[in-house]
Amino acid sequence: MVPNSSAALRLTELARASEKHAPTHDRLMRAYWEEGQNIGDPEVLRTLATELRLDDAEAAITADLHGEDVARATAEAQAIGINAIPAFLLDGRLIVLGAQPDEVFEQAFDQLARA
């Protein structure tokens, strides 16, 4: 399942504004990757938002609350060459795109150490 994550991204921006970004991000990732939940489903997001005690979640889920924040972050990521999810910016100098095996990260850290 590859969900449309737009509403989930808006929800994480809502959480960021409420200083709840880290637990919200972690919960969404756990819901998707470990529990196999569809984080593109508004009902799933409502349940998670309630669990996380996020105020104004409905506007982020069904409307465009924080949509401009998501668009800005997406443009910034694309401007530095990030075009895949997940993406990892290591030491502000090296980007690793996509889910990669440990060996790729080990090589990346070695490359950074030599630079």
Image (cartoon, rainbow, N blue to C red):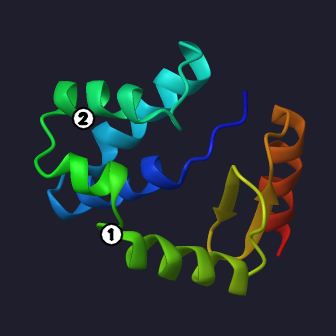
Please name the residue shown 84% across and 40% down the image.
100
Quadrant where the N terminus lies?
Answer: top right
Relative vertical location of residue 29 with respect to residue 107 in this rendering, above or below:
above
Badge 2 element: helix
Instruction: Give x and y (percent) for residue 47.
Output: 28, 24
Total label count? 2
State the CA–CA distance, disc 1 to disc 2. 15 Å
Left or right of residue 114, residue 40 in this image:
left
Left or right of residue 17, residue 39 in this image:
right
Instruction: Give x and y (percent) for residue 50.
Output: 18, 29
Please name the residue shown 81% across and 56% down the image.
97
Relative vertical location of residue 114 with respect to residue 62 in this rendering, above or below:
below
Q: Residues within 10 Å of mark 2 (few under 14, many from 20)?
A: many
Instruction: Give x and y (percent) for residue 77.
Output: 64, 76
* Residue type beneath disc 1: His
Residue 66, disc: 1
* Residue toward you, 76 or 44: 44
* Residue toward you, 101 or 50: 50
Left or right of residue 83, residue 61 in this image:
left
Q: Residue furthest front?
A: 62
Give whichever of discs 1 and 2 has the lower sequence position: 2
| Residue on which the image places disc 2 | 49
